[in-house]
Amino acid sequence: MKARRCPSITTVRKGNKDLIKDLNRFLVLQHIRQSGKVSRTDIAKATGIGLSTVTNITEEFLREGLVREVGTAHSTGGRKPVLLQFHERYSYTFGVKVEETQLRVALTDLQAEILDVKTVPFEAGSKPEKAVELLSAAIQVMRQAHGLAERQIAGIGIAASGLINRETGTILRSSLLGWENVSICKEVSKRLNGMPVYLDKNINAYTLAELTLGSKEKQRHVVIMSIGAGLGLTIVIDGSMYYGSFGGAGEFGHTIVQMNGYRCHCGQRGCLEMYASEFYLQHAGGELRRQYPHTAVERYTFSGMEQALKQGDELAARLLREMGTHIGYGLVNVINTLNPKRIVLTGEGMNYAPHFLPYALKVAEENFFAAAALPTEIVVSQLGNDAWLQGAALLVIEQLFQLPIYQN
Ligand SMILES: [Zn+2]
């Protein structure tokens, strides 16, 4: 695989004489990837491509090692058809999540299955150079530990928080990390001999995992919302993620819900994130504490609230009820703006959902469409914590198997 350097995600390749061949290869490979095990005849039927072309293409795939033969199917007469399967270990990826005090690095196959995972701690407030150095070193060590050559790595996908330009692979600003204008793709790629590196927002990577690995139904008009230390959102329209002009869409947490409200880390006042995430527990908790002199609350975090609730603490119950109610108004605004079929909730806050989600759902029920009996389904994501890393790996896999007209 030739080395590429932070390729632009929206580059549209110019037409050329090989394009039809590439399109046929794409369609055949996509069908094999989606089918599990499939015969050449069934590929031809499903794609509408002639059997002889399918045979030529699959021969190429077998030679390249992208596909392998895996036994035969039952025959209704004549020769038993040979079944083909996508070779998920044709190459590998690394999926990375940059967190406030640690990097999580996973080695995956081409179905985004995690084969190994490591956590690399770093001090809060570390310079980006430090994170780049630790990340590059961790990838090299893991690659060598698995006996993989550099050419066997299809690329690296990085998921991070903050304002991100996915086209240039730059973290423009992350208040959580205290970083500005970090060309993370370029820097990591430089340390790894030009290996392709892709970057996206955490929640977008998670959404890729949800769309690829989660429930396949009702995913055409869906909104993914993460609730935790902050509030993230990804919009899926007609089955595709909506990125905005450079990948910045979905900063729903910074829509203003209270004029002259709490000061947000983004610089504005009254952002939804200050009222519908862990930030609210800190802001309102500080203000209300005097009214609850006997409160058991020690830390204004989700886990701190849960501890206090065990002792029947009224302040903790009030903060979570109010935060839940605010999340509900956020959901109403999403529903009324986008009319999604479904909203999927995720994020570390969901570990504490029983304490606030019922209040959110009660408010969300009364939206514009509900009056016409057109409900939006609101569900909690069934994917586990690894989905962030799998989503980061899918940033690479998506690039690898995209329609040829979008390749570099
Ligand atoms: Zn804000």
Image: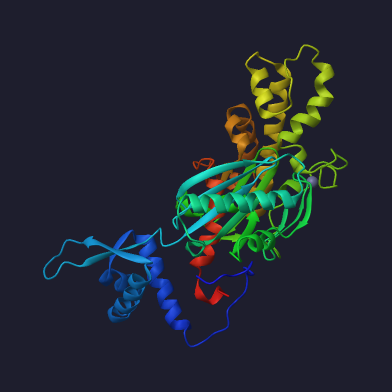
Residue 374 appears in the picture as rendered: no
Taking depth in this image into account, of 72 and 138 the one nearest to the observer is 138
What is the x, y in percent for residue 260?
A: 88, 41
315 w.r.t. 325: above or below: above
* Horizontal arrangement in the rendering, residue 229 relative to residue 397 (left or right): right
Residue 97, x across and y down, in percent: 61, 48
Camera-side residue: 37 or 240? 37
Residue projecting furthest to the top:
294
The single residue placed furthest to the left in the displayed view is 77
Task: Please state if 406 lies on the left or on the right of 99 as rendered.
Answer: left
Q: How is the image coloured?
A: rainbow
What residue is drawn where x is 39% and y is 69%? 29
User: Could you tell me which residue is drawn at 63 percent across and 70 percent down?
Assistant: 10
Residue at position x 61%, y 32% in the image:
357
Residue under the image location 22 percent in, 66 percent down: 82
Figure disc tally? 0
Q: Nearer the viewer, residue 5 or 229?
A: 5
Whether residue 189 appears in this view of the structure is: yes
The reply, left or right, for residue 232 in relation to residue 29 is: right
Q: Residue 112, how many percent across, how many down?
A: 47, 53
Q: Which residue sits furthest bottom?
A: 17
Quarter in which the C terminus is drawn: bottom right
Residue 247 on image: x %, y % = 68, 61
